[in-house]
Image: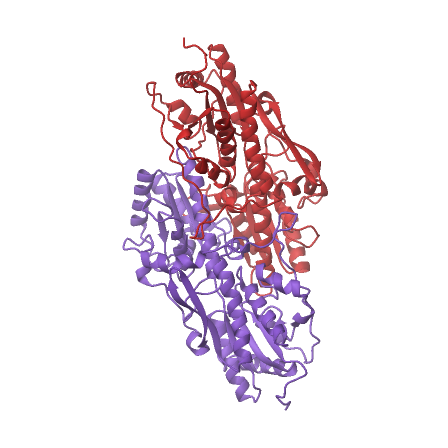
Chain colours: A purple, B red
Amino acid sequence: MKSNASPATDRLLYAQSGGVTAVINASAAGVIETARAHGVKVYAARNGILGALRETLIDTSKESKAAIAALRHTPGGAFGSCRYKLKSLDTHRAEYERLIEVLRAHDIRWFLYNGGNDSADTALKISQLGKAMGYDIRCIGVPKTVDNDLAVTDCSPGFGSVAKYTAVSTLEASLDVASMADTSTKVFILEVMGRHAGWIAAAAGLAGDHADAPPHLILFPENVFDEAAFLAKVKATVERVGWCTVVASEGIRNAAGQFLAEAGTRDAFGHSQLGGVAPVLAALVKDKLGYKYHWALPDYLQRSARHLASKTDAEQAYAVGKAAVQYALAGMNAVMPVIVRTADAPYRWKIEPAPLSKVANHEKKMPRSFITRDGFGITAAARRYLAPLIQGEAPPPYGKDGLPAYVQLKNTAVSRKLPDFKP
Amino acid sequence: MKSNASPATDRLLYAQSGGVTAVINASAAGVIETARAHGVKVYAARNGILGALRETLIDTSKESKAAIAALRHTPGGAFGSCRYKLKSLDTHRAEYERLIEVLRAHDIRWFLYNGGNDSADTALKISQLGKAMGYDIRCIGVPKTVDNDLAVTDCSPGFGSVAKYTAVSTLEASLDVASMADTSTKVFILEVMGRHAGWIAAAAGLAGDHADAPPHLILFPENVFDEAAFLAKVKATVERVGWCTVVASEGIRNAAGQFLAEAGTRDAFGHSQLGGVAPVLAALVKDKLGYKYHWALPDYLQRSARHLASKTDAEQAYAVGKAAVQYALAGMNAVMPVIVRTADAPYRWKIEPAPLSKVANHEKKMPRSFITRDGFGITAAARRYLAPLIQGEAPPPYGKDGLPAYVQLKNTAVSRKLPDFKP
């Protein structure tokens, strides 16, 4: 067995996991810049945990200082990410053991896994198995998810920027609808992400703060969709305001528990899972109320819109990357840097370590107290929580061509040392 | 008959027409600030030409200097717009005569109509009928349309910003898809506006400038949709690049001339016009190629995204508003300020008057030479034309709340002088 003595250079492996965000690369920048400052070399796994399993590693020391700094304003996942869940040690034992072998083969002392609940669980298991297999690997989680459903942390890096995109888009589209409503669209429906929790939909509520300001209705996955109440409120809004903006979470369900997006539409080929709750709601508005409608479904645009990132979010994403390295170097294991809110207004926050065991596989629900009694709006408590998260702008630099100057890394491969492995 | 002698204050009526844009209010700012500088009072018609017919006029002199300046960075139509086409003098004679009566009742000497082809036609007819009815009204068009289909002018204010939004969104979403393609979405479809011309779709081509850069396919309404060629190119792209971004104009049609958006889908209520060519294409990709897909349909978000406006576009929108007033005060009639390109690189432009008769009811097609031979991309000529239009950023100021500081005018009504009229 190879010893755990330090190699010539200390090495750290960083991997991105699950759906990417507008600021996950800011966490990568935080990791790499902090590691470099301490003389630690960072390898990145290509396409997330799959890269660690396949031993397709990237040597980030081949990237220039400027390229790493540019990660701070570049959306997407610079090294690739993946959707691949490692389940229990029993079902996926070969994978876990392979991970340890790869880490050992490259003298990697620390594994930093940038993801959500599942990733926290994976990182925790790797640290446990490493110990059992006699390889001392320290695992640190780095929080990330647009869904804002990570436990312990006050908010999840990635969420603030999609929240800002959603609030700004709601405001802008509503100005458009308001000016045309006399002869054109009366009801506008914006569909946002959030299959299980209404965090993103709730953020749309920041677009306006009085009764007749948009959005007039928010449809949360926390509530059963009530067609009659929905139609009544849309009708009352159009009659009072002249038009109506609806923000709908993709995850809303009917009383039978079916996703509305799947229950309503069927295309020419008979597929039922095209997605899109917005067109279903639009059809309802047209059919039952006769109003002209438009709908939008920004999909990936909302989670990749680095051009409209929240400064708060971008700073927190960097800070958790930086703290993860500091924790690793301080000898911590099986922890995740989390964001602790110390004040609402003016907003203050700090970073603290939390045990991965408290984060892994937990899901933070949106408090019921964040939704107004009629079910279609957000409360003052929700505003207090959400408002700081969209504060500040952190626009990327733009080139002369009018496009954001996003970086494309070289992603130089590390020489492989092990036989193939098919996850 | 009332005389045409100047009233105590010279008055100008400004109206917005048709679909609004991210920068139409910049034209309004150009009109009002220039008029104020010359001691001319500006009335605005509420909800476009309908406000002129109904005599629901707004006195913009009640707005502060700061509020008018803020129009320069506020999307939507600040006084309301409408879709209402005045046809020939024969069919709509009562409306035309009513317009003259309203202009006369309020001693309005100039009518500035901010819109597209139809509006140019209406403005022309009003100037002709005024003369016939013995009321000397000068009509000036102010160009506006995201569709970029206005004749004579090199480009249309409003287009540059939607072009920039489209190119940036294509780039950002593609970074997202690229990083996840190994285990997740392989084909991403972005549906953009453009029912009859592919100008907006073409602008997406600015996101990348080499063969494997996104977007990999652009579907133009100028081409008949060729399912086999589409699928073959998507497949080849996924096999070569690993993923594929498609940008589709909402107006693409099949060989039978049907809009794909209408031919393909039918919802639970039997409606066929829900819109959305993206889900139809997605179903095709899934059905014929088996790839995981995602699609986005930003709809109004794209034409109201003032937060991502092109500086070039915002400046041109202001300039045409300013020039329209200058032309009016110089005694011109039945003209429109148009943008003349004097150099591609570095881009230079100027404003010149063009007769409304040359603009009215003409439609500028996208040159066939802008589309590559295979039908799925843009040529160097297209890049040369499009590139300058998205150059520069003109972000709005943001409030402490993290939202753009868009202005809501008071829109104080002018006292009515005439009996009701139902258009």
In percent of width and height, residue A101 lies at 61, 83
Identify whether B332 is placed above or below A322. above
Q: Quadrant of the C terminus of chain A?
A: bottom right
Q: Residue at x 56, y 49 (%)?
A: B190
Identify whether A65 is placed above or below B209. below
Foreground pick, A386 / A235: A386
Foreground pick, B417 / B382: B417
Q: Quadrant of the N terminus of chain A?
A: bottom right
Left or right: A272 in relation to A65 = left
Q: Is residue A57 visible?
A: yes
Foreground pick, B360 / B52: B52
Q: Is residue A259 visible?
A: no
In percent of width and height, residue B345 lies at 71, 41
Identify whether A338 is placed above or below A257. below
Left or right: B337 in relation to B51 = right
Q: Residue at x 33, y 21 (%)?
A: B420
Foreground pick, B145 / B33: B33
In the displayed orientation, state which residue is furthest to the top.
Answer: B1
Left or right: B89 in relation to A44 = left
Left or right: A392 in relation to A108 = left
Q: Residue at x 51, y 56 (%)?
A: A309
Q: Residue at x 52, y 73 (%)?
A: A323
In percent of width and height, residue B87 lies at 48, 21
